[in-house]
Image (cartoon, rainbow, N blue to C red):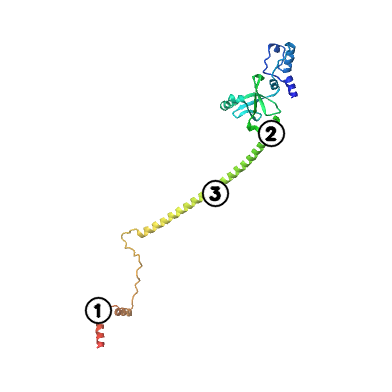
Amino acid sequence: MIRSVLYHNNHHYMEWYDRNEFLVADEIDPIPRELWNWGIKNRTGRLKKQPEDIVKLNLLYQGTATVTPSGILFKGMYYGCDLATKEQWYTRARVRGSWKVKVCYDPRTTNEIYLWLEDGKKFETCVLLEREERYLNKRFEEVEDLLEIEKHSTREKLDSVMRAKIELDAYTKAVVEEAVRKTGAAIQKSALSDRNRIEKNRQRRKMEKEMNRTQEAFVLGKPPVANERKAQIVPLSANDSSHLETSYIPPAKKISQIKAYLKEDDGEST
């Protein structure tokens, strides 16, 4: 704290400080120690009394925060305050976009930061939001280290995820290529089978048509061809002829012969 006070009094260059013509003429820089010494020498030397909080505010570290729709972002943490809620800063940031605000902070605690208002004559206390509870009661440097560790861990995790994604993509590509190859082969085989089947059917129909044409076509001027085989004629000998003559009885002769047999039977019986 003492070092901060010494730095502020001896080296803090206040660009916002409006130097009058006498300060400019005497080449006095807007540094607290030089302004103090010049005032003691050239003014009445009477000290001005300021509220203790305002004095402390002007001794704190200064920085720049960002008003976002999610809160006032400073060094990776989100803060909120009544002024921001009352003036609907978060809604405006959502509609019009984010903007910067000047803040003061004590590096020994992350619990609060302070909006720098009216050139350091007023301030508004901002507290950590409830969702940032893990940052409570810590020094800013501790949070910075924690965020850096998380950032490094996230990078390593993303590298691991990237490698796994590359391996997955390579495997998926290989599977897809194999599936495409097998599908193409199956389609080609199916096409060949279809062509063979169609060709066989075409040949079968051609043969059937040829057979039907040969068997069923009308040819004029030629005797029809019998479907059945002709009976083979076997010549008979003389003995066979006499035998046939005795065995074969024409209808008229057969009746006379029957009557002769009947008469012979009657004669024998008498």
- Residue 161 % position (x, y): 63, 40
Taking the image as shown, residue 256 lies to the left or right of residue 16, namely left
Q: Is residue 177 above or below residue 141?
A: below
Q: Which mark is residue 178?
A: none
Label 1 neighbour load within 10 Å: few <14, some 14-19, many 20+: few
Q: Which residue is mark 3?
A: 182
Q: Are marks 1 and 3 in contact (CB under 8 Å)?
A: no
At x 65%, y 33%, the residue is 133
Cα separation, mark 2 vs mark 3, equals 53 Å
Q: Is residue 37 above or below residue 152?
A: above
At x 47%, y 52%, the residue is 194
Q: Are marks 2 and 1 in contact (CB under 8 Å)?
A: no
Quick check: can you spot residue 99? Answer: no
Q: Quadrant of the C terminus?
A: bottom left
Q: Which residue is mark 2?
A: 146
Q: Quadrant of the N terminus?
A: top right
Label 2 neighbour load within 10 Å: few <14, some 14-19, many 20+: few
